[in-house]
Structures are given as C-alpha cells and as structure tokens.
Amino acid sequence: NGGADDVDRLGMSLRGLSVSLERRWRELAQLDAISRKVNAGVLLDDVLDELYREGRDIFPYDRIGVSLLEDGGTLVRARWARSGLGPMRLGKGYAAPLSGSSLEAVLRTGEPRILNDLVAYLREKPASDSTRLVVEEGVKSSLTCPLVANGVPVGFIFFSSATPGVYTARHAETFQRLAGQLSVVVEKARLV
C-alpha cells in the first residue's frame, strides 16, 4: 500500500542485512579456524603468533600483548607481545602489581574492557606506567580481555590499535568466544 518508495526502502534494508550477515558469517568461519589452531597448539608462543597473523579480520589491532598472573595473582608480568607499530616500549618481562591497577576490575567483573582514547585515559591516570609506555609506542585504543582457565584467572590479552575509537562491544563479544580456549592453552603451556 505504501508504493514504490516503501518497496525500495525494503529492498535496500534487505541488501544491507545480507551484507551484514555475510560479513558475520565470514568472521565466525575465521574465528572457528583460529579456534581449531588454538586447540591444536601446545606452545603458547606458537598459538599467539598464529593469532597475531590470522586474527586481523576478526579484531582490529596493530599490537597484541599477553600478560600472566604470578606470585599467587598479585603480580602481572608481560609474557608475549607482537607489534607492527615500531619499537616496543612495553615488552616481555615488564611487571607491575595487580593491586590498585585498573586490571583488578577486569578480573573482578570477568568482562573485557574497551578504552578507545588511551591518550585521554593517560591524562586521567598519569601514574599508569604501562599506559604511558604503550601510548609512546603509538597505541590509541585497546581491548583488554581477562584470561580465565577453569574458573581461575591466569592473565590478560591486550588488543591495541593505533586508531582511536576502533573497538566495539561486538569485538569484546567475539573475543569471549575464543577466550576459554586461549586460557586453557595458557595453562597447558605453563604446565609444559
């Protein structure tokens, strides 16, 4: 009853939905492929290197870092990192207490944290040495995800981008599909 304009709008909406569903299907297929590789891996560095190479279509990033909890969960130590931004300022071995850090809230909630303006965040929290170091590397936004294996927090994975405002709730949701498998790989690697 609405005429040609309504039909045109419906057609455009259906085309948009089709494109969106196709993109989501491709992302899920890639996530499934990465999940199979993660499950097959034993060596943590190999699994993380594979994620760095293959994950760009799922997560936007220029840098990925992994930090693990040590000393009964009181210390966070950088274990692995890869970056396409140039010299890394925060690399393997960097350590900081968990207590008093913003990472405590990430573990407490078990939810990923999105910071889409790290420069502004650093102005608010100038004592954050780790934030200062990654901002010096060129990082503008980050997605921090807790790694929890069998109900026990084991560390964090940090997706970072030189583009501000790049992360959305969809990225956090997508990561949560992979998080459990990646957390178990971290635990397996620790045992090995």
Image (cartoon, rainbow, N blue to C red):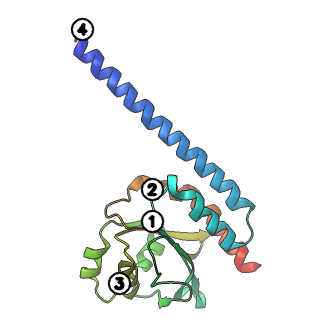
Crowding near the residue tagged with mark 1, few <14, some 14–19, many ≥20 C-alpha atoms within 10 Å: many
Q: CA distance from mark 3 to mark 2?
A: 24 Å
Residue topped by disc 1: 112
The quarter of the picture where residue 7 lies is top left
At mark 4, the secondary structure is loop
Q: Position of residue 89 (x, y in %)?
A: 45, 85
Q: Residue at x 41, y 75 (%)?
A: 105
Q: Locate residue 12: give its quadrant.
A: top left
Q: Nearer the viewer, mark 3 or mark 2?
A: 3
- The CA distance from mark 3 to mark 1 is 20 Å
Image coordinates for residue 48, horizontal then vertical, percent: 62, 68
Residue indicated by mark 4: 1
Which amino acid type corresponds to the residue marked 4 in the rendered image? Asn
User: Quick one: quadrant of the C terminus?
Assistant: bottom right
Q: Which mark is residue 171?
A: 2
Front disc: 2 or 1: 2
Callout in the foreground (4, 2): 2
Residue furthest toward the right?
Answer: 192
Q: What numbered label is drawn on residue 132?
A: 3
- 44 on left or right of 75: right
**106 left or right, relative to 44:** left
Residue 27, position in %: x, y?
53, 46
Question: Which mark is first along the chain, 2 or 3?
Answer: 3
Mark 3 surroundings within 10 Å by alpha-carbon count, few (fewer than 14), some (14 through 19), many (20 or more)? many
User: Considering only order in the chain, which callout, 1 or 2, is on the residue closer to the N terminus?
Assistant: 1
